[in-house]
Structure formats: C-alpha cells, structure tokens
C-alpha cells in the first residue's frame, strides 16, 4: 500500500495517521508547506523505519537471554514416585519429593520428604511410618565453587544485554547514516535541477532577444542559430537533471514509513531544505571539534569489545576452575517429625562426598588454552579498533576543514564568473561582444555553480560521516 504524503491531511481519520501526527507534533511533523526538512525526515526514519524497529529486537534478545540465564537459579520442585505390584503382592511403593534452591558459588539448599513401603523393599530404603524428612545442603568444594557453568552463564548474559544495546545503537546509526546520505543526494539533485532551470530561462530570454534584434536588422542570422543551439543544450541538461532528481526522490521514499509498516511515497511537491548546511551540525550532533577520551571510550564498538573482553575473562576463569578436581559434598539433617524443629540434630544425618578428577586433563587444558587465545584476540581487536577510530575521526575532521575551504573558494569563483557573464552581456548589447563568448562564460559559470553544489554536498556528507563514526546520529 502506497500513501502519498500530499494526501495525509485527507486521511487523518485513519488511526495510523492519528498516531503519526501525534508522534510528530512540533519537531517531527510533515507540514503542508513544500519544504521537507532534514530534522522532520530523520524523525520519521528513527521511529518508523523497519530496520530501526528491527534493531530494537536486538536489545529484546539480550533481555531474553538474561531471563533464560536467571532461570538456572529458579527454585525447583521434584517428585519421584515408583510402584510395583505383581500377583497381588505390593513389591514396593516409593515416594521421594524434594524442594531445591540453587544459590551462588555452587551451593544448593534442599528439603526432602521420603516415604517408602512394600514387601520387597530394601532395608536401606526403610523409613518411619510417617515418612522421613530431611533438610540439607550440597556444594562443590573445588571445581565449580568459585566459578561454575550456571554462575558464568548468568554473568555473561548480563554483559550480553549491554552488548546487544550497543549493537542496536550501531545498527540504527548505520541506517540513519544511509538515510541522511540519501537526503543530501536528493538536495544535491534538486539544486542542480534548479541551476539548469534558471539558465534555461536565461537561454530562452536571450534567444528571444536575439530573434528580435535579428528581425530589427541589428544582429546577424548566425546569432539566432547560436542562441537556439545554446537553448536546446540547456533544455537537454534540464531534462537529464530532472530525471536524476526524480530518481533521488524515489530513493528517499525507501526510508519513509508509517505505523504498521506502511510505506510512504514522497509527494513531488515537497522540496528539500536548501538551508540544511546551516543546521546540519545541530541536527546531526556533529559539532564536536575536540574528540575526548570519554567520547572514544563510550563508543558502541569500543564498549561492545570491552564487554566481550569481560565475557571471555569469565570464560577463562571457568576453564581454569575446571582444572580442579571435582569434590561434591552433601549433608542432610534427618527427622520423622517435621513439626518439631529441635528434632533436627547431628545425631541423625545423611552425608556423602563424591571425588573425581581426569588423569591427564587434556580436555580441560585444551579448553583453557582456547579461552586464552580468544581473550588475546579480542584484546588485539580492541587496541586496533581504538587506533582505527581515532585515525578515522582525525581524517574526517581534516576533510571537513578542507571541503569548507574549497567551498569558500568556489563561492568566490561563482561570484567572479557571474560578473564576467554580466560584463559580456553588456558588451554584446553595445555591439562589442559576441554571443559565443557569452555562452562560453555562462557555461563556465554553470560548471562552477555545479562544482559549488558538489563541494557543499561533500561537506554535508563528510559531517554525516563524522557523526556516524562518533555514533551520535541516534541521540
């Protein structure tokens, strides 16, 4: 479904249009005038573009993984019931119910109720008539005490949540950068189209004036041919630039969406804001001239790598812990009367210990070595990313300064060429100049004006690139 922005006011009764206008009231609303500003455009892209919405799912995924990791510490009720009866004889009837609470450092609290009976019940399974109650604890003394799978997974999930948030910021930042570049391309195409249009009007006026002068006997016929050729060339340039402008407008529409993933087609009556160079620093948050350590350290790429580094430190700690022998102990107080808490004493208990250790630890040593390699790899990546970001920022700052200097020079050139064209036209009117020279001067003027538009476009795109590197577009 395609909705034309020109007809939005006629469709305000629809719910999604109501939502749209509410969300873009003062700062992000497409108004009825013909100017579609960069700020309005970015407001729509940020809120409604599908990839921007998709990026929010990344953070949701991090929250889901954290919830899953926390689930390993959920209390658990466990019931084990077995019964066997054959030829009228009850061999055994066993009931074992337990309530377990996993805690930090591999410690598990447990309450248990056991009730067994039957003709062929083993002696060790015999319990009092009302059953046997127990309360106790189990824990790992070596492997799994300071670092275990459950504890490590939860810590890593907490870090992954923050990694997901930084990944989301980078994804949205990339979408916004592409959208901004498309807007600047639309602005450039529009300005080029306007330049060719303006000089087509000049060529038409000049042609009519030359024809009038020829009919009055003041100009030769060849001047009418010269003026006609110039007019046709200008008309050809206008048509080429018009198609280029329309294509850039359609490309811009790729980033325009409404609620419920409804695409929007930009109406041809809307025009880009030619004052964008004056507000670009404010809109893009690209006015930072001095890049501080805090800006670099809070960059999503740096933060994500630092969090990844912390995850790998946790993994290395877990693999180191796995080198220790497995020593699991448990101790349970026993009683047949759960109502009498003082009946729990050290005279009645059930205890156990389980010890095991691989002889060569090849698997554990291999896992530890791999964990250390991964950690070294991310350390190298972190150092390289810091240097790369800093160099990119410095390079882009130099580009901005250079393009702004070029823009100032080209603007002066445009003024000089305009003066030359005006001077040649006055000489031609006095019968001293030639139409060929006017057309030549004007062609150089057009070329310089287009060069000025191109340089300004480079300034805008470089500032957008600067904001993208700093990752400030989403703010």
Image (cartoon, rainbow, N blue to C red):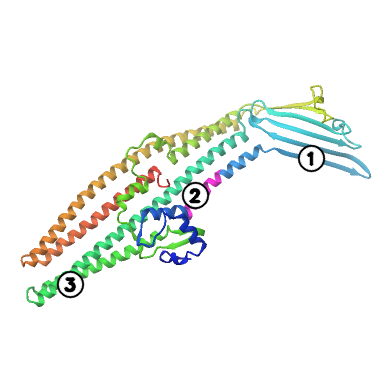
Which comes before the other along the chain, label 3 or label 2? 2
Q: Nearer the viewer, residue 194 or 51?
A: 194
The picture places residue 215, in percent across and down from the top left corner, at: 10, 77
Compute the Cα span from label 2 to label 1.
45 Å
Say which quarter of the image contains residue 439: bottom left
For the residue pair 285 and 78, the one nearer the viewer reads as 285
For mark 2, give the secondary structure: helix
Tell me the element at label 1: strand
- Where residue 370 sits in the image (x, y, percent)? 53, 34
Residue drawn at x 90%, y 36% is 120
Residue picked out by circle 3:
228
> Which image quadrant is residue 316 in?
top right
Please name the residue that numbered disc 1 is placed on: 80
Residue extending farthest to the right is 88
Residue 221 visible to the viewer: no
Question: In x, y percent, where is residue 270?
Answer: 36, 62
Horizontal arrangement in the rendering, residue 144 relative to residue 374 (left or right): right
> How many neighbours does mark 1 have within 10 angstroms: few (below 14), some (14-19), or many (20 or more)?
few
Kindly identify which residue carries mark 2. Answer: 55
Residue under the image location 33 percent in, 47 percent down: 281
Q: Which residues lie in the magenta part? A: 50-62
Mark found first going from the N terminus, 1 or 3: 1
Q: In the current view of this chain or complex, which residue is farthest to the top? A: 347
Is 405 magenta? The answer is no
| CB contact under 8 Å: marks 3 and 2 | no
Residue at the image position 23 percent from the left and 50 percent from the top: 407
Q: Secondary structure at mark 3?
A: helix
């Amino acid at each position: 479904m395609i909705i034309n922005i020109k007809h939005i006011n006629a469709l305000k009764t629809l719910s999604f249009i109501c939502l749209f206008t509410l969300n873009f009231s003062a700062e992000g609303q497409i108004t009825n005038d013909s100017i579609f500003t960069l700020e309005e455009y970015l407001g729509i892209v940020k809120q409604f573009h599908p990839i921007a919405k998709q990026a929010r799912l990344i953070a949701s995924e991090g929250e889901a993984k954290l919830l899953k990791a926390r689930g390993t510490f959920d209390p658990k009720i466990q019931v084990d019931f077995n019964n066997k009866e054959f030829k009228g004889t009850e061999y055994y009837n066993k009931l074992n119910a337990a309530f377990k609470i996993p805690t930090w450092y591999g410690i598990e609290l447990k309450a248990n109720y056991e009730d067994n009976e039957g003709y062929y019940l083993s002696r060790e399974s015999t319990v009092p008539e009302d059953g046997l109650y127990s309360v106790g604890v189990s824990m790992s003394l070596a492997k799994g005490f300071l670092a275990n799978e459950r504890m490590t997974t939860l810590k890593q999930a907490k870090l992954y949540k923050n990694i997901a948030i930084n990944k989301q910021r980078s994804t949205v930042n990339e979408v916004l950068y592409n959208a901004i570049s498309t807007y600047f391309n639309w602005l450039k195409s529009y300005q080029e189209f306007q330049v060719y249009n303006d000089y087509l009007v000049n060529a038409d006026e000049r042609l009519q004036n030359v024809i009038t002068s020829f009919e009055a006997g003041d100009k030769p016929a060849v001047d009418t041919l010269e003026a006609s050729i110039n007019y046709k060339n200008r008309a050809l340039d206008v048509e080429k630039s018009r198609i280029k402008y329309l294509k850039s407008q359609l490309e811009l529409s790729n980033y325009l969406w409404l609620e419920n993933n409804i695409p929007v087609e930009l109406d041809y009556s809307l025009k880009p804001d030619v004052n964008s160079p004056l507000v670009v620093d404010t809109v893009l948050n690209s006015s930072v001239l001095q890049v501080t350590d805090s800006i670099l350290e809070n960059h999503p790429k740096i933060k994500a790598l630092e969090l990844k580094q912390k995850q790998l430190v946790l993994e290395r700690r877990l693999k180191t812990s796995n080198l220790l022998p497995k020593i699991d102990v448990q101790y349970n107080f026993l009683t047949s009367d759960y109502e009498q808490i003082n009946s729990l004493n050290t005279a009645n208990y059930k205890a156990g210990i389980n010890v095991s250790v691989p002889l060569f630890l090849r698997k554990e040593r291999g896992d530890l070595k791999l964990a250390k390699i991964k950690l070294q790899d991310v350390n190298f990546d972190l150092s390289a990313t810091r240097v790369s970001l800093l160099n990119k920022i410095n390079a882009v700052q130099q580009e901005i300064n250079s393009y702004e200097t070029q823009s100032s020079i080209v603007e002066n050139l445009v003024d000089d060429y305009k003066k030359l064209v005006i001077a040649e036209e006055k000489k031609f009117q006095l019968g001293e100049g030639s139409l060929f020279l006017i057309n030549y001067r004007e062609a150089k003027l057009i070329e310089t004006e287009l060069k000025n538009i191109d340089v300004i476009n480079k300034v805008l795109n470089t500032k957008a690139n600067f904001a993208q590197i700093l990752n400030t577009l989403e703010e």
